[in-house]
Amino acid sequence: MTDGRLSALRDLMARKGWDAVLVSGSDPHASEYVAPRWKQVEWLSGFTGEGCAVVTADHAGIWTDTRYFILAGQQLPGTGFELHKTRVPEQVLVPQWLAAKFKDDSPVIAVDGLCTDVTTVSDILKACKDARIANVPDLLDEIRDDRPPIPSSPIMTLGEEQTGWSRTMKIGWLRRWLAERGLGAMLVSALDEIAWMLNVRGSDISYNPVVMSYLLVTAEEVSWYVTKGDGRLDDETQDSFYELRADGVKICPYADIEIALSDIADDENTGKLFIDPSSLNYSLYYILKNSRLGAGMQEDGNGARGIIPGKSPIALRKAVKNELEIRGMREAHLEDGLAMEEFLYWLEKSLGEWDEESRARRNIYDSMMYEDTEAVPLTEARAAAKLHELRSRIPGFRGESFETISAYGPGAALPHYVTPEEDSPELKPRGLYLVDSGGQYLFGTTDITRTVPLGPCEPLECEDYTLVLRGHIQLAMAIFPQGTAGCQIDALAREPLWKSKRSFGHGTGHGVGCYLNVHEGPQDIRQNFNRQPLLPGMITSDEPGIYREGKWGVRHENLLLCKNAGKNDFGQWLEFEPLTLCHFDTSILVTSLMEKDEIEWLNAYNARVYDELSPRLPKEIAEWLKEKTRPV
Amino acid sequence: MTDGRLSALRDLMARKGWDAVLVSGSDPHASEYVAPRWKQVEWLSGFTGEGCAVVTADHAGIWTDTRYFILAGQQLPGTGFELHKTRVPEQVLVPQWLAAKFKDDSPVIAVDGLCTDVTTVSDILKACKDARIANVPDLLDEIRDDRPPIPSSPIMTLGEEQTGWSRTMKIGWLRRWLAERGLGAMLVSALDEIAWMLNVRGSDISYNPVVMSYLLVTAEEVSWYVTKGDGRLDDETQDSFYELRADGVKICPYADIEIALSDIADDENTGKLFIDPSSLNYSLYYILKNSRLGAGMQEDGNGARGIIPGKSPIALRKAVKNELEIRGMREAHLEDGLAMEEFLYWLEKSLGEWDEESRARRNIYDSMMYEDTEAVPLTEARAAAKLHELRSRIPGFRGESFETISAYGPGAALPHYVTPEEDSPELKPRGLYLVDSGGQYLFGTTDITRTVPLGPCEPLECEDYTLVLRGHIQLAMAIFPQGTAGCQIDALAREPLWKSKRSFGHGTGHGVGCYLNVHEGPQDIRQNFNRQPLLPGMITSDEPGIYREGKWGVRHENLLLCKNAGKNDFGQWLEFEPLTLCHFDTSILVTSLMEKDEIEWLNAYNARVYDELSPRLPKEIAEWLKEKTRPV
């Protein structure tokens, strides 16, 4: 499918005199998930995981982390691309690899300046001091003509009753923040920060309810540079635009950001312009560098007279949820938990009725409950579709918060497995099934993983299941002093696994937005030296796992709300409260491996799930849940 | 005692036009412990903890960390100095404080360039962009005339049978390391690195067996710039010098380093000169900056054509002990453990014979055992002296590895308590006594803390005792993947304390040298984002604590050797082995608070202590130890 693309790129490189090309896999806003137009690593190499590609005359590599090693092992052979592992001790990152590759040369490294952020380029130039960067917007367009357009989905606005803070409050806060630091203006380039600032949502990117746009805030003006298109300005959306204009937001064409930025950075009256190099693309950096304010700007964004680089304050402000957002997140988790329990009930009953000897037999329970009359085998894809159907009945449901991982057996051994639509593996009444999914609701975002036995499990499966749950519980039970960063408590989730010499190669927890991106910073819980302390109001996932290639995978995930836990002689204390409401299966638990306080936590959590969900569940499911949440 | 010194300094500042003076508290080699000549913070302020002082026209401050808050609270009132807390979330470090203080000014900040390292100055200039540094070697000499001289204690050399690696092997290794990186020479300025490189030891600094010196290694020459003095070149030492010369080490006067460095940095044939800015003092930096190779060097050491700043490779190489060093460390811990057990036995028996009603009564046991005929009360100082006496009987004993903390009750609440010689508090047969001490032996270095009940304890004391031991054991039991840094497992030692909302304000573990500094890098186990992975062969302390001001303190400390723990599908695993051999008292343990595996670890450890020590202990102490190590 990608045949010929690599050689076409190399032909282009030879014509242009480029020694290396970096394809970033991101979009002009350094987004994690991107619209189809920017899935350029996939277009070039066929690799569908997250990562970037570097191509030279004699080497083509994909740099990706532990989550995608197995996927890369499946997708890369025969493509001409080799896997470069990251987040492993022996990692050689792109800048260092390029530096070693072109040790005594002064290579020309071409990047798609629109899709490569300033920090990435700066890291390369720090390592390869003699390299020259060729800034080529839409670089791959020279060898492709099938590229999808810039998305422009309908836009909606959210009211203060949903967001807690109105957009005028948020703009006022940002202006104060800038003024306190002697700054005159800020370019906001991260899409979730813009959505949060303006209380707008869209669906320009799958799963992330954001709007392709830039936001320019000065002491006098707020200008929103946003794509327009069919349906983007329909009747409903018109209202949104009126509302934004009424709040003083000037709506401008997306493409005009380049001229506007050039104008503002040439205007001595602007004062100092604040930018975040981690989400600013290199093409816009180039415009700034050639402006009056940007004179003297170095590759890392520092050194300019009138442009100040730094960490956007919006990310942290957004991560600390206010009371209304927390209320919305609680509601989302209650609704989502009801759908999850209905799903797990359906799964168990369907499997009970379905066995290998009678594949053709009608799935009696399913047809009875949901008037599905067609008899089809129970596959990973069908389970995912059922879960989608249950979630989509919830008022305010806006779609999944990421692609559902519905994985049985070996599939679950891939932390970021993609459930195939066609020839989807069939679920059998034995072993473990893993479902990692989440919903976007008008009032919140969810992200939950449950691993459940579909029948008898091997002793090692039961052990893995238990140890991962112990890790999950240890982190969920943590009490820690104010000022503690996620990487300083990450080991709590890993220790029960480590003791048995098992581990997992991904982070333990990521921040989660409120009806926004399911992955957000600045906090996380992983082995990464991120200094951001966990703060009351932050919501972070807790998702340890164990993966055995070709066999099975276990992951248990709740979202945790960080809360104050009182003060004493030793200082201020923090703790977590699980937001997720869905029982953990206890049937294959090896309780002899568990600590007493872990079992107590588990029983209390399952009891809380039953208490909160059962009044709103159909009677037979409530009864089933009562059995499932019986104390161990 | 320090009266008038602060105002004399301010008079000097006014005359010189200095807006601020930084007194670093370190020596020309960025040593942690310093000879009396460089205890300048103490001379100026009376504060005896570790920290630095900053004086301006209207403010005088001491910056120190959590370990010394209580001490500072006792020593600073009335001195004119205020406490600035570091290692707390709200800390404002010196550079940021100076930046805020002189916000719109261009201050002149004077430093004693000999005693201030390049990194410290560079951090100040990064924060205070408009500041100017006045480089004033021996700055305080202008207002003092009683300054102790540069030390020059006798020097000894160690053979290959003690160090595992001969000095010619080490020099060969360093030269290869330099050559592989295209470097021509290295200035070694950290004293423990020089002692390790040359296999020399001295006693220029209390507790740290190092020699005041610099080492300059080029492809052709090894030049050692070392102080000379009475007794430094006696007969015995002559041999050492001959031995060094025979291995090609050129011995030069200490003060000649300035000329030598100037010469070498002006010589185009030198090639690139490697320096470590974290131990290079600012005065030497100044010489380098004004040399041919140093042209263009910035304040952080970067930017010069021919001088390359970086982390010295010696620290890491030294931290990973070889087999002979590990054997020596084991021997040191066996001998040290015997002394510790004799001490604890003596303590218990002495207290049994000693009560408040009969202060004048002879201490029967003591006089019987050790022919101490004088009856004196049992004080903190006397206990420390007894422990010293027991250690000093060990062949190869060279002195303590740091000042013994012998602390009863409230004294133990100060993590870095200094046991007073006069009016030393008396030990009573109730509550907790803490002793943190270590020995320097020709074959190794020890560092051990035991907290023991001298009689009945309050329930909260017993709880604190138990929780700290749980923290100690959790870290000691840890199994973790290769590549893990200390800060990534630090929480394991804290979690049992955190669960009860208790904590401690110091690091959990520091690296320990082999007959070298009791504190060494590059690894540690603390909440500090130090990326250095723990490696097999590294020796690190494990010393959690709980401190209750005015009441008591608990700390339990062993040294742990990091070892390989096998490989499996999940990767390479590491674990710890305790080197320290001395039982943990179980009499006040609240076992109901402990996990099963913690109790198993404790019983196994105490059994091992008995097995290894009892054959070499006097019969009555061996029998006593058998009781003490009975399983719980």
Image (cartoon, coloured by chain):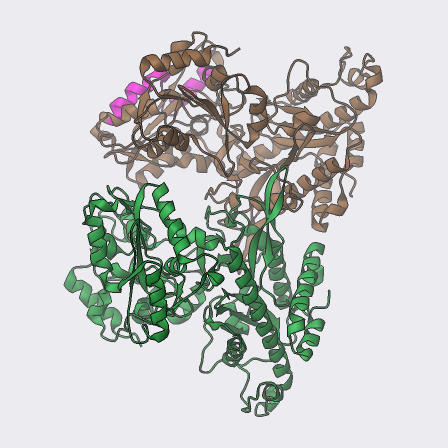
Chain colours: A brown, B green
Residue furthest out toward the left: B15
Is residue B44 among what the camera can see? yes
Residue A444 position in % (x across, y down): 56, 29
Q: How many marks?
A: 0
Given residues B216 and A576, the one toward you in this image is B216
Q: Quadrant of residue A8?
A: top left
Residue at 28% over, 67% down: B227
Residue at 59% over, 92% down: B361
- Queried whether the magenta region covers residue B581, the answer comes back as no
Residue B104 position in % (x across, y down): 22, 48
Q: Is residue B609 above or below residue B369?
A: above
Residue furthest out toward the front: B246
Residue B491 position in % (x across, y down): 56, 51
Quadrant position of the C terminus of chain B in the picture: bottom right
Residue A429 position in % (x across, y down): 79, 25
Q: Quadrant of residue A149?
A: top left
Residue furthest out toward the right: A357
Q: Is residue A93 above or below residue A141?
A: below
Q: Is residue B320 above or below residue A256?
A: below
Residue at 61% over, 24% down: A417
Q: Quadrant of residue B470?
A: bottom right
Instruction: Please provide the residue range marked out in magenta.
Output: A237-265
Quadrant position of the N terminus of chain B in the picture: bottom left
Is residue A154 among what the camera can see? no
Q: Is residue B353 above or below residue B527?
A: below
- Mainly helix, strand or loop, the magenta region? helix
Residue at 58% over, 76% down: B343
- Queried whether the magenta region covers residue A249, the answer comes back as yes
Given residues A575 and B445, the one toward you in this image is B445
Given residues A244 and A620, the one toward you in this image is A620
